[in-house]
Amino acid sequence: MARFALTRLASLVGILLGLSVVVFLLQAVVPADPVRAMVGASATPEIVEAKRHELGLDQPLPAQYAQFLSRAVRGDLQMSLHTRRPVRTDIAAFLPATLELAATALAMAIVLGGALGLLTARGRGTSLRVGLVASASVPTFLLALVLLVVLYAQLRLVPGSGRISAELEAPTGPTGLLTVDGLLAGRLDVVRDALAHLALPAFCLALAPAVALGRTLRSSLQTVLGSDHIRTARAKGLTERGVLLRHGVRPALNAPLTMTGLQVGMLLAGVVVIESIFAWPGLGLYTARAITSVDFPAIVGVTLVMGAVYVIVNALVDLAQVAADPRLRVR
Amino acid sequence: MSRRLLPLVSVLAVAILLGSACSSTPPPQQGAEGGTLRIGYLADMAQADPDVFYDIEGNTVILSVYEGLLKYKPDSTEVAPSLAESWEVSPDGLTYTFKLRSGVKFHDGTALDAQAVKTSFQRRLDVGAAPSYMLEPVASMQTPDATTLVMRLKHPVAPFLHYMASSWGPKVISPKALADHAGKDHAQTWLNEHAVGTGPFQLTAFQRGQRYELTKFADYWGAKAHLDKVDIRIIPDIGTQRLQLQSGDLDAILHSFPQAELEAAKSNPDLQVRDFSAFLNNILYLNTNKKPLSDPALRKTLASAINRDTLVTEVYGPYAKPSSSTYPSGLLDPALAPVSYPPGETTAPANTGKLTFAYTADDSGVHRRMAELIQQRLDAAGFSVTINEVQLPQVFEYVSDLQAAPDLVMQTNTPDGAHPDMWARIEWYSTGGLNYLGYKNARADKALDQALETTDKATADQLYGQAGKIVAQDTAIIFIADPRDVMVLRKNLTGIEHVPNYPWALNFATLQKG
């Protein structure tokens, strides 16, 4: 276990270093002057240069990178050019919304994908399969807009945007996840309202991963269902459902778990569009604004955090795979 | 691909909704007091510090919470009293004496006096952010008594009163708040998300990335706001904003409503489409510093080939006019610096080569449509044009390498104040902040410098006209359109007051919700 943790930690550091280098190189390649955009058209050349110097942007790129690294190891991700706050503060403010959305979407994807895989492996669930595949084949932004028109504007079943209704005084901590904080504070009204706001954006994010998971699980299950131990289970007189759930699922989990880890990356990429459409105040929205402002400190910070989340989730997936299939521990 | 298709799909989705929603119409009610106005911002305003804020999205917050010495009259370019009830300018244009209003309170209950104004203005200079340029000509400030502020300039500055009335002009912040939260940065960290001004509304919530809340200030010195609150939500997708406006969850969209949807909105009985004169100006910069557009004759051919007048109608419909001058409509008599681009039969020489054309993205879809039509028209005239959508910080970089910069850049700009200097100096002065493609003409610069220090308005206007004529003759910038400031509001909103120099903004204090 200690070796596993150390290996993962080393890979996390390596990946984050690699990501930071890529973003810094991008900064060199993209011709843009964020300082001029920041100080405005009427700023005198002296103000522009003073700001450039203050931000360290008048130094060569390697020097900027060295300075970034020395500050980053102390947890200082520099100041955002757009919000003029420490990037660390911004990320702390925006990350919980994205984590709550992504975690809900992942949970939805696992439930929907699991149902799809289990049903279709037994030759059932055709309508679910057709519905999910058809919905997932529609671009996410289009699906989101259509669902907004129908479920929000016409039927008024869900809220139109944001994380929580303006009239509700939401608890401010400790986790920043409104559903969790609402539960901890005993505020069921907040939990209900937060879940209502989560439903549509999480569903839109969950669809494509759900189909990918479902298909992988189905294929895996079909392989497992043809194996010897399943034949033995059937010979013992177990029902088909019992065979599937007690003897089929666990050995078939390896590939779907790998797919779950991969889909987390897709899901994190999808939040930029979904958060824009649903005015979800998370890192996706923050990133979209950072990109239009060419706010490289913010872009680097978000990239590192997203990279870390991806690596950590995949490490958890590895652990889950070992739990599902103990033979992996030996290897 | 998805980001490019998003506006188009939004338009289709909302068109269906708008079409299906032409049902019962509540009759507009007049004169109601109280209530909450709900509007959306497409982007976070980043900071609420009036000495740092230098954007357009967010100026409704600044203008509701803070006040300066002067403001503009509605639908006018004329400056009017605000915290100063009167003012005098010395004949040499160097001394400005402002008589301040009595009985003005800040939101923290402290009283306004001349020292408070001086402290605030000095703070703007100490912070030294972009809007500080408006106070840099000030050599000294004196407060001979509690209601008098005397400002002595280093040299005459023709637009100085307009600096004081500008949306981004010096605002007065409570000295108590500045002292209490001074920190090591002149209270910048605190004022990033808090505000203590004298305006008709107080900033009572600033949730970054989510919403801001303004609450009526009961002790406001002037006509008190009709609304109790203004709830501003950050909704970055214009399609989502339109759905919420249609559903009654928003009361107004103050800018960027897609041009293609305006007719449908007009026919919706729940909505009103209002358009106001503004100093927005759609312009096309030409790169005079590299081949092939370093050739003035080719620039003129290109200007004719665009067939500008029909282009403007096609893109904006009734919501813009072809520019008649190098200055936005209303800043200067158009006859002093006229422009026209009669369509011509000439075509580009065969060896012209390819032209690159960059434009900045906008949510209303106008820029993309305009760029595509210009490309078509230029291609038809023998040019070969490649268009690219870019972000503003990329545009600011062009001037550092003009040989690598595009041949054409299109953008919509607005001046900080209703004075010709505040337009010409940023657009085509050789070091102008929005002179993206580095146009230089020493004669134009000289005329602008002379005008800046000229106290006689008629003479100064002649000089501004002279500078404008030079840039028109050089065809360094093609002045395409003077668009209107278009807003879509729920029908029950009344008391609508707009100032041409405060784009994308209404006076929230006069608004009423029936």
Image (cartoon, coloured by chain):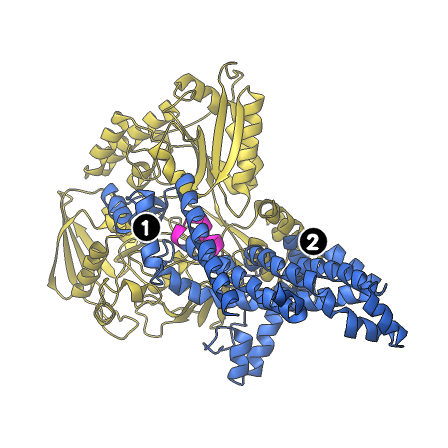
Q: How many marks can you see?
A: 2
Residue at 36% in and 53% down: A81
The N terminus of chain B: image quadrant: top right
Find disc 2 in the rendering and name its residue.
Answer: B16
Q: CA distance from mark 1 to mark 2?
A: 54 Å
Q: Is residue B289 magenta?
A: no
Res A84 → quadrant: bottom left
Q: Is residue A295 magenta?
A: yes
Residue at 40% in and 18% down: B295
Residue reaching furthest to the top: B350
Q: What shade has chain B been given?
A: yellow
Instruction: Decide: is B312 above or below B298.
Output: below
Which chain is home to disc 1?
Answer: A
For badge 2, the amino acid type reads Ile
Rendering coords of residue A278 (x, y %)? 57, 61
Q: In blue, which chain?
A: A
Residue A66 is marked as: 1
Q: Specify start and end residues of the magenta stretch as a single range.
A: A287-297
Instruction: Decide: is B40 above or below B257.
Output: below
B389 left or right of A153 in image: left
Which chain is home to disc 2?
Answer: B
B181 left or right of A206 in image: left
Rendering coords of residue B130 (x, y %)? 29, 50
| Secondary structure of residue under mark 1 | helix
B327 left or right of B301 in image: left
Residue B85 is marked as: none
Closer to viewer: mark 1 or mark 2: 1
* Badge 1 density bin: few <14, some 14–19, many ≥20, Cα 10 Å: few
Res B114 → quadrant: bottom left
Rendering coords of residue B250 (x, y %)? 55, 63
For badge 1, the amino acid type reads Ala
Instruction: Decide: is B344 above or below B458.
Output: above
